[in-house]
Image: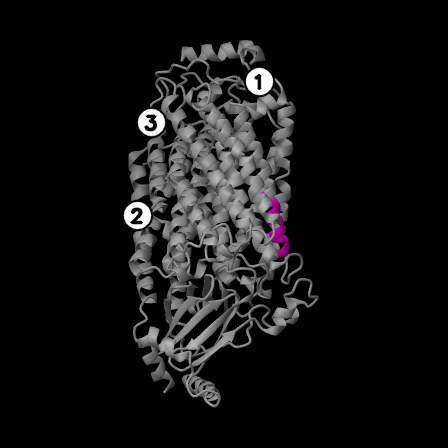
């Protein structure tokens, strides 16, 4: 412990000055050839933010067309292109890179390492992404129209695409390579570069959830690559993997896709679990309740994600035994997920709560992710799913887990660690406005979609019968306001980068963990000397006299 | 001990929340006839759809109950343990094996109580034995084809002209001026009430999904596969019911509705006879009947019985 304070003091004395940092000089040199975990993390986060607004623009166009019945703005084919691009960009462009960006920034600081284990691969895995997305977004403008078969890319429909298909498939291969490299880097860093004394069961929760996520990524990204490659050869080389007329099986694609797709949705939520597990104890001024149970629950969710895929396929005509198996295995997920929600709630219990912006986002996550979890439980019931499948009820469900779930977690994480990154506090008042506007309008946007689905509105339709008008209007208004509220986010971040009240090393009164032992902003090479701590617990050095 | 204290304090919160939620069932029971602002699933018109509705409502109330307890506890904690009101963190409270076992075991029991009725309904939906009429449904981009197996009666069912005109980009026609905008077809599927009907669903080009909420049936129409479902409409539910394609199938996925006209057994026989008679003069044997009979022999037999 003494060691830590020494290290912290050393950094503070030098004030993070550049000459010992060997920080590359010049804009291009610094950013293009960067091997620094913080610079690469920043690039990932900026990229993710840009994609969040690009993907969000597609969502705004969708809600615009759906504001009232009748076709007002877009051809139905173009509308399908919008829904497809919205999903692909949000999943692969906004959410996944945001998590990798946070991992880059935080994992070395949290485990007591100077940098990621494989810095050149880190650079490579980021710089693949802009090219992947140039291809994917470029596919909107090619002859034959953009991708319009949905992000699930079911054949035979997907094979009817034009030149957009090979472009998108190549983009998926690039993204997959990028994700796998990112995951390898995370695993190697965590396994080899932890501070002495930080055993696996003493790691911070964010590190734990990312470790499990990284294994999921390595397991399933190749599966996606295989599925889309088969689509490619079906389209261009005369194979019949998924073509019934040639002896193939269109349902096989769905099995392969969802074997990727279900772990993928946990890839999109597990790091958020980690972020929330960091934020709630900080602002409850109390350790995370049931740390070990949280790890086992996360690992169980990771395992179960591999055996539930066909719950996305209850209406394809599976045999009764399969339907029963996938219904029951899906229901099992409720148990570890419940454990997590209860543990977070119990962390609040008998705490000393304060409500700074990160805590607000984490609490909103807790409530709304639970709503998404409960509708997920309803969807697990195979016979009831016959009515829910492919309706707006499903749309409402997965947007509740992805927007107030994953996205709120990421935003909360950024507000939590931003002072550590920039050395400045941000505009708390504006951040609270951002929070309240987002929270109100995300519910106006997505809650009515439950009603629409139950009333019988299918998803992925550009126009609807007149009885669906009212809730669609409400949803669209919520959507526009939610979208507009997000503009505050880059403004707040930009202001914070430029200046503001100086942040202390600890930043938040109740913050525990190695990253808070470093000065703010964190030095260019996080932990040049490994902090040696025998008393580490849950990634946090034990402070006897901490206030 | 902690639990007991928690529960006592939560009870108050639960009562408050229950009061607020008491308005919910009223809202859910809003008349379905006036379809705007609809909140809930239709109970439907046959035994399967009603069982699904029952399961849905069971799940819904479980979810409401769980939400009241979990959110009640969260809201209580947030309201009670604020630093601003002088709350001091109890840092020793980091785990409690008894509580953790309870909140693992109780959900298991709840899940079992959900799984049993769900499995029962599921088994029932797959039991098409004893059907008296078989209808083959084929999804095309972007229309449905219906074929009464063993009778030679078949037709294509497409979006009606009025909706089709109004749904063109900038048509200038108000959707409100079109009766059943986007939910009307030129040739509805006619089915008898009080007869167990088996449907055989397949796709001709891409995957579609035949969904009629009132029947509780959603079956994917997949090229190379024949999926089976069944319904048996209550004799008193004569009327017209509507659904839509539920699997993205290309540009006009949103414009291939399903309309079923439920008629009495007698009216159905009359209607089917008229259709068969209309087939006779131009061609004595309907060519489409042969492959249908070959691939779905039991269905063809029962179909023939119904039409006899």
Image location of residue A215, percent across then percent down: 37, 35
Image location of residue B157, percent across then percent down: 51, 74
Name the magenta segment's main secondary structure.
Answer: helix
Distance between mark 3 and mark 2 Cα atoms: 27 Å
Q: Which residue is mark 3?
A: A201
Distance between mark 2 and mark 1 Cα atoms: 56 Å
Q: Which of the chains bears the disc numbered 3? A: A
Q: Which mark is residue A24?
A: 1
| Residue drawn 46% across the image and 33% down it | A275
Circles 2, 1 touching at the beta carbon (< 8 Å): no
Tell whether position A324 is magenta. no
Q: Front-most of B150 and A300?
A: B150
Q: Is residue B159 visible from the viewing direction of this image?
A: yes
Distance between mark 3 and mark 1 Cα atoms: 36 Å
Secondary-structure class at tag 2: helix
Magenta part of the protein: which range? Answer: A55-65
Q: Which residue is mark 2?
A: B108
- Is B59 placed left or right of A90 in the picture? left
Image location of residue B82, percent across then percent down: 49, 32
Secondary-structure class at tag 3: helix
Image location of residue B34, percent across then percent down: 56, 68
């Amino acid at each position: 412990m003494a060691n830590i304070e020494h290290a912290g003091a050393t950094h503070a004395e030098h004030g993070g000055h550049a000459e010992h940092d060997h920080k590359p000089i010049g804009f291009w040199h610094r950013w293009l050839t960067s091997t620094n975990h913080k610079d690469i993390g920043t690039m990932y986060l900026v990229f993710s933010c840009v994609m969040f607004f690009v993907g969000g623009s597609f969502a705004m166009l969708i809600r615009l067309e759906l504001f009232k019945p009748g076709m007002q703005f877009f051809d139905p084919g173009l509308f399908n292109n919008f829904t497809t691009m919205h999903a692909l960009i949000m999943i692969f462009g906004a959410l996944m890179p945001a998590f990798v960006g946070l991992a880059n920034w935080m994992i070395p600081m949290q485990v007591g390492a100077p940098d990621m284990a494989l810095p050149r691969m880190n650079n490579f895995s980021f710089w693949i992404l802009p090219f992947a997305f140039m291809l994917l977004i470029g596919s909107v403008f090619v002859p034959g129209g953009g991708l319009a078969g949905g992000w699930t890319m079911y054949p035979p429909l997907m094979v009817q695409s034009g030149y957009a298909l090979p472009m998108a498939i190549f983009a998926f291969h690039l993204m997959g390579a990028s994700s796998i490299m990112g995951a390898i880097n995370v695993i190697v860093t965590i396994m080899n570069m932890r501070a002495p004394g930080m055993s696996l069961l003493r790691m911070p929760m964010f590190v734990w959830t990312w470790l499990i996520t990284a294994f999921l990524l390595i397991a399933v990204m190749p599966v996606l690559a295989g599925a889309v490659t088969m689509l490619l050869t079906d389209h261009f080389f005369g194979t019949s993997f998924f073509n019934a007329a040639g002896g193939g099986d269109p349902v096989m694609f769905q099995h392969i896709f969802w074997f990727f797709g279900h772990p993928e949705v946990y890839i999109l939520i597990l790091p958020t679990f980690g972020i929330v597990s960091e934020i709630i104890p900080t602002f409850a001024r109390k350790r995370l309740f049931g740390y070990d149970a949280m790890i086992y629950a996360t690992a169980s969710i990771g395992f179960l994600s591999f055996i539930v895929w066909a719950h996305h396929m209850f209406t394809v005509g599976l045999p009764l035994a399969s339907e029963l198996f996938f219904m029951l295995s899906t229901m099992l997920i409720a148990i570890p997920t419940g454990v997590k929600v209860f543990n977070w709630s119990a962390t609040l219990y008998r705490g000393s709560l304060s409500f700074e912006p990160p805590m607000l986002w984490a609490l909103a996550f807790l409530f709304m992710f639970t709503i998404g979890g409960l509708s997920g439980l309803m969807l697990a019931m195979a016979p009831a799913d016959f009515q829910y499948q492919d309706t707006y009820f499903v749309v409402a469900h997965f947007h509740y887990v992805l927007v107030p779930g994953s996205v709120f977690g990421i935003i909360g994480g950024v507000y939590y660690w931003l002072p550590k990154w920039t050395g400045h506090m941000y505009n708390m008042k504006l951040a609270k406005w951002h929070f309240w506007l987002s929270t109100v309008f995300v519910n106006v946007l997505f809650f009515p979609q439950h009603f629409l689905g139950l009333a019988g509105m299918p998803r992925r339709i550009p126009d609807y019968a007149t009885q669906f008008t009212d809730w669609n209007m409400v949803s669209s208004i919520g959507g526009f306001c939610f979208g507009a509220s997000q503009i505050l986010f880059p403004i707040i971040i930009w202001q914070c980068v430029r200046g503001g009240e100086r942040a202390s090393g600890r930043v938040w009164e109740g913050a525990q963990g190695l990253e808070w032992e470093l000065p703010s902003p964190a030095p260019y090479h996080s932990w040049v000397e490994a902090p040696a701590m025998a008393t580490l617990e849950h990634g946090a050095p034990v402070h006897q006299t901490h206030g | 001990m902690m639990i007991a204290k928690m529960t006592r304090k939560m009870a108050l919160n639960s009562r408050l929340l229950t009061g607020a939620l008491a308005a919910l069932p009223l809202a859910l029971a809003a008349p379905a006839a006036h379809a705007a602002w609809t909140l809930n699933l239709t109970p439907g018109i046959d035994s399967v759809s009603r069982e699904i509705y029952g399961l849905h409502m069971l799940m819904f109330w479980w979810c409401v109950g769980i939400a009241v307890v979990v959110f009640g506890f969260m809201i209580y904690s947030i309201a009670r343990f604020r630093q601003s009101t002088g709350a001091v963190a109890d840092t020793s409270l980091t785990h409690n094996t008894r509580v953790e076992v309870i909140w693992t075991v109780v959900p298991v029991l709840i899940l079992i109580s959900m799984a049993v009725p769900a499995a029962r309904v599921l088994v029932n939906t797959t039991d098409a034995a004893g059907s008296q009429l078989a209808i083959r449904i084929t999804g095309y981009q972007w229309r449905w084809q219906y074929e009464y197996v063993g009778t030679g009666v078949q037709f294509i069912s497409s979006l009606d002209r009025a909706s089709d005109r109004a749904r063109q980009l900038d048509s200038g026609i108000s959707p409100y001026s079109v009766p059943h905008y986007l939910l009307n077809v030129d040739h509805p599927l006619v089915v008898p009430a009080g007869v167990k009907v088996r449907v055989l669903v397949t796709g001709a080009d891409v995957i579609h999904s035949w969904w009629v909420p009132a029947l509780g049936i959603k079956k994917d129409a997949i090229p190379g596969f024949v999926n089976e479902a069944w319904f048996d409409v209550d004799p008193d539910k004569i009327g017209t019911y509507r659904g839509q394609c539920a699997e993205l199938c290309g540009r006009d996925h949103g414009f291939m509705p399903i309309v079923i006209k439920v008629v009495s057994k007698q009216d159905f026989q009359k209607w089917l006879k008229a259709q068969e008679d209309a087939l006779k003069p131009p061609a004595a044997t309907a060519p489409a009947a042969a492959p249908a009979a070959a691939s779905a022999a039991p269905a063809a037999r029962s179909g023939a019985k119904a039409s006899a």
